[in-house]
Image (tube, rainbow, N blue to C red):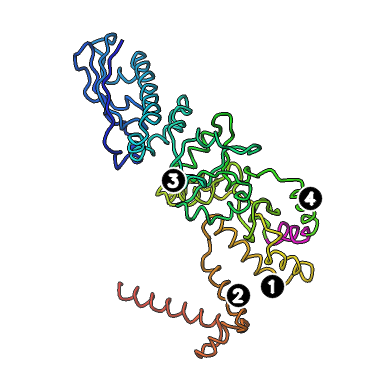
Amino acid sequence: NFVALLFISDKLDDDFFNSLHTPKSTIKLYVRRVLINAEIGGFFPHYLSFVGGIVDSEDLPLNVGREMAQHNELIKVIVKKLKRKILDYLKKLMLQDSEKYDKIYAQFSSALKLGIVEDEVNSNRIARLLKFYSTQSPETMITLDDYVARMKPGQPGILFITANSIKSANKSPYMERIKLKGYEILYMLDNIDEAIMQNLRVYDNKAIYNIGKEVSDIPQSKSEEKVLKEKEVEFKPLLDWLKKTYYKGRVALVKLSTRLLTSSCILMASEQGYSGNMDNMIRSQTNMQSKNSGSEDVLNQPKNIEINPHHPLIKYMLNQVIDDSTSSDLAENAEVCFSIATLSGGYSIEDGVKLAGLIERLYLKSHSISVDNISQNIYDELGIEDEDKAQDQHQEFESSDESESVKEEL
């Protein structure tokens, strides 16, 4: 038997995500109205650390200590019941007073989302409380129940896209074909959203798909399947050349796209891989600076590239392969395609200098400016014999400068 009086804080702590492993004291524990512990760290899981209050038990022993309280079986029963009470209260509030709930959700949505990962037993209860914007509701957030209720017949599951904003999500090549199907897409705009959806996987017996990953292929009509088979035969020379030559070792798979409409190509993560949004977020974390080998291995997993057989660039590359597969222009176009796919997929370019040089060459060519012997012409104009000599002179200068410094120090 116990009595609890709980309250919800006015805002989430600024260091909420930085204190995941530091249990916060939010509950005062009483036994038969005697204060036993004024600071029980970790009474609730971290995602409910915004809930505080007092708990008074009739059954706990008066000598229960701080360490004992955290591992006491009666405490675990109390916590289990209170967690459900809190989640059921929030669900009831969402249904009966949506305006009040939305104010709470605006403050604590990140905490609740963490609960999907942190509290597997109650993940479905928590999922009922989550709200997102969508393609059909870009200004008013909807629940997953709202989404499921208006899914189209034959829709493969709950579909979402990760992005920094609704505007950038709508411009994503991942959205091009799927919007024509009339499917509603949820916008996942918080950094934690992709992780929670990946952890949830299924809601109300509906599979959850990230349309920015390989697993989210949308069923095709018979006419679409027929066109795809014809294009696979037509574009086989280009696909083979990209797989076996230019993209070998850089991607796991090269195939014709069923999701692109007006874009030329796109880079896709595998089912277990990271989307561009998640990839960038993880790379930006401070712990990645230590080159954690496990994370690096996952981040560097080969991705798949899809090319659009209806796009003029891809058609042009097909003709180049047929005419001369050793052409330097073909290699440049393949590199352009890969860079486009990488950026369009939301991933970062590893060699920005190389891309800048390629863009410069293509720009010069488009204006009929010769790109031959650019470096040599500049050296001649400056009176430098050649690049190697210039490098030798530079190294010689650095060496002599270093020698003088050493002499002075001695």
Instruction: Using the image, tell me which numbered label, if any, was put on residue 191.
Output: 3
Q: Are marks 3 and 2 in contact (CB under 8 Å)?
A: no
**Amino acid type, label 2:** Leu
Q: The C terminus appears in which quarter of the rendering? A: bottom left
Q: Label 4 is placed on what type of residue?
A: Lys
Q: Position of residue 230 (x, y in %)?
A: 80, 55
Toward the left, the furthest residue is 34
> Which of disc 4 and disc 1 is earlier in sequence?
4
Residue 165 on the magenta span: no
Q: Nearer the viewer, residue 82 or 351?
A: 82
Crowd tier of the residue under label 1, counting other residues whose Cα lies within 10 Å: few below 14, some 14–19, many 20 or above: few
Q: Is residue 364 above or below residue 351?
A: below
Residue 195 lies left or right of residue 226; in this view the side is: left
Whichever of callouts 2 and 1 sits on the residue coming sooner in the sequence is: 1
Which range is magenta?
235-246
Of the numbered discs 3 and 2, the one sitting upstream in the chain is: 3
| Residue 362 locus on image (x, y percent) | 60, 75
Q: Position of residue 310 (x, y in %)?
A: 70, 61
In the rendered image, residue 58, in percent from the top left (x then y), is placed at: 27, 9
Q: Identify which residue, 199 or 261, lies in the foreground.
A: 261
Q: Which residue is mark 2?
A: 362
Q: Of callouts 4 and 2, which one flags the residue occurring earlier in the amino acid sequence?
A: 4
Task: Tell us which disc is closer to us: 3 or 1.
Answer: 3
Distance between mark 2 and mark 1 Cα atoms: 12 Å
Along the polypeptide, which appears first: circle 3 or circle 1?
3
**In the image: residue 64, left or right of residue 383:** left
* Residue at mark 4 to residue at mark 3: CA–CA distance: 39 Å
Residue that numbered label 4 is attached to: 226
Asked if residue 16 is positioned above or below residue 238 in the image, the reply reads above
Inter-mark Cα distance, 3 to 1? 41 Å
Could you give the CA–CA distance between mark 3 and mark 2, rounded to whole angstroms?
A: 36 Å
